[in-house]
Image (spheres, rainbow, N blue to C red):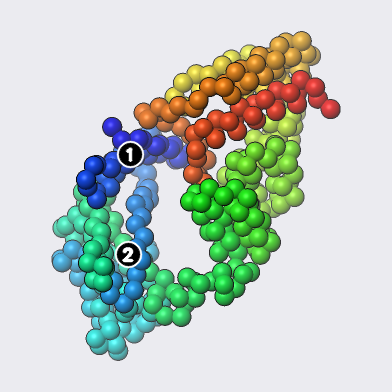
């Protein structure tokens, strides 16, 4: 059984699971996916399985031989295929005989997406004629019908993107992507933070950067007060995104300001009473007696005037976190979880260390509040 990751999309409650299998002596990367609609309504979804390839004048992509037309996103434009006999992405391919075959990278001068409109086959891919090898993507078209090729283009714009950091160090997206690469590939935490800070300096109005940077700060072990201060200083951008707004509300709760999160003091008092009776949390497909929610229980008890009970809960949380720090992290490949949309890869041991350190900090912070 290959390792499995899963996510529940919180807006429409759709569930996606996938596992990746590598076989000895094989160049095959096998991905097995399962999608579940957990609602009584018909829902739409997007699923990507991306492969990137080094391209040059002798690189050729291919679709099944019965493909006669391709389309842009949402069918905003269409073209014949493989020979483009029309205008597509602003390029008059009909006026470029001999250079209008869309399978060849060298013939596509501008950033271009082209997707199969109709086929009875299950494959597509690309071939490097210089290297004598390539890749092919195979999937049951009745389950995964999409087939798309994308390029930045083989003229000035595409080449400029590839060297954009050198050409223009003020382009925020370049630093954002370098930040992701520093974290996910190089495992360089310092560089990841520096690139995101540079990206925010280049474009302080980008709400995506704000949302992703606060995720990065959490992974770097930044305390809740610091992360909250960062979000509150950019409140209009935070409220522009669901994920950042949810994080803001969570941090208000975590820092003992649930009334600000709810905005309704009478209702908050009733919630305090409910929270005080809670026991445990459901994480990683199992009930755990101690988690971040344990702090909220203690805070609720304190708000209700039950200070000694609150202290007992926090002391038990502190003891639990200290004990768990000495135990190695494990993963249940069959478990599912409800993470944020992840743009940063996780190391399970580092994740556990951060989580236990956070629980210890929270317990100690609220045992001896300022």
Name the residue that disc number 1 marks.
19
Which of these two is toward me, 227 or 118? 227
Residue 126 visible in the snapshot: yes
Which class describes the residues within 10 Å of circle 2: few (<14), some (14-19), or many (20+)? many
Q: Residue 71 placed where, x, y %? A: 31, 68
First in residue order: circle 1 vs circle 2: 1
Which of these two is toward me, 209 or 267? 209
Note whether 126 is above or below 260 in the view shown: below
Q: Residue 328 placed where, x, y %? A: 50, 25
Which of the labelled discs sits on residue 149, or is there none? 2
Q: Is disc 1 in contact with disc 2, using a CB cutoff of under 8 Å? A: no
Q: Quadrant of the C terminus?
A: top right
Residue at coordinates 61% horizontally, 57% vertically from top-left?
195
Q: Quadrant of the N terminus?
A: top left
Mark 1 vs mark 2, foreground winner is 1
Q: Residue 123 placed where, x, y %? A: 21, 57
- Quarter holding residue 260: top right
Note whether 254 is above or below 363 in the view shown: below
160 sits left or right of 18 in the view? right
């Amino acid at each position: 059984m290959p390792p499995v990751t899963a996510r529940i999309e919180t807006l429409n409650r759709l569930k996606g699971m996938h596992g990746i299998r590598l076989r000895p002596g094989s160049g095959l990367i096998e991905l097995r996916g399962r999608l579940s609609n957990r609602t009584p309504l018909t829902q739409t979804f997007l699923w990507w399985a991306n492969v990137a390839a080094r391209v040059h004048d002798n690189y050729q992509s291919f679709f099944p031989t019965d493909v006669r037309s391709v389309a842009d996103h949402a069918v905003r434009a269409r073209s014949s295929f493989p020979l483009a006999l029309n205008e597509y992405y602003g390029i008059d391919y009909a006026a470029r005989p001999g250079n209008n075959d869309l399978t060849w990278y060298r013939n596509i001068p501008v950033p271009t997406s082209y997707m199969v409109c109709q086929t009875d086959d299950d494959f597509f891919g690309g071939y490097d004629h210089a290297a004598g090898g390539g890749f092919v993507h195979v999937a049951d078209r009745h389950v995964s019908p999409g087939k798309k090729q994308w390029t930045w283009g083989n003229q000035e714009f595409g080449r400029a993107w590839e060297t954009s950091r050198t050409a223009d160090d003020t382009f925020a997206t370049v630093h954002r992507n370098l930040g992701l690469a520093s974290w996910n590939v190089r495992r360089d935490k310092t560089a990841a933070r520096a690139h995101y800070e540079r990206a925010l300096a280049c474009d302080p109005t980008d709400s995506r950067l704000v949302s992703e940077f606060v995720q990065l700060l959490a992974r770097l072990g930044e305390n809740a007060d610091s992360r909250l201060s960062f979000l509150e200083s950019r409140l209009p951008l935070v409220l522009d995104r669901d994920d950042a707004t949810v994080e803001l509300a969570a941090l208000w709760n975590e820092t003992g300001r649930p009334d600000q999160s709810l905005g309704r003091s009478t209702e908050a008092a009733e919630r305090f009473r409910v929270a005080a009776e809670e026991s445990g949390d459901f994480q990683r497909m199992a009930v755990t007696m101690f988690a971040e929610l344990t702090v909220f229980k203690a805070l609720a008890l304190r708000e209700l005037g039950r200070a000694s009970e609150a202290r007992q809960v926090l002391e038990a949380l502190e003891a639990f976190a200290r004990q768990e720090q000495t135990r190695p992290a494990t993963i249940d490949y069959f478990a599912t979880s409800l993470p944020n949309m992840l743009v940063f890869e996780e190391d399970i041991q580092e994740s556990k260390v951060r989580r236990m350190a956070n629980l210890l900090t929270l317990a100690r912070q609220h045992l001896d509040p300022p």
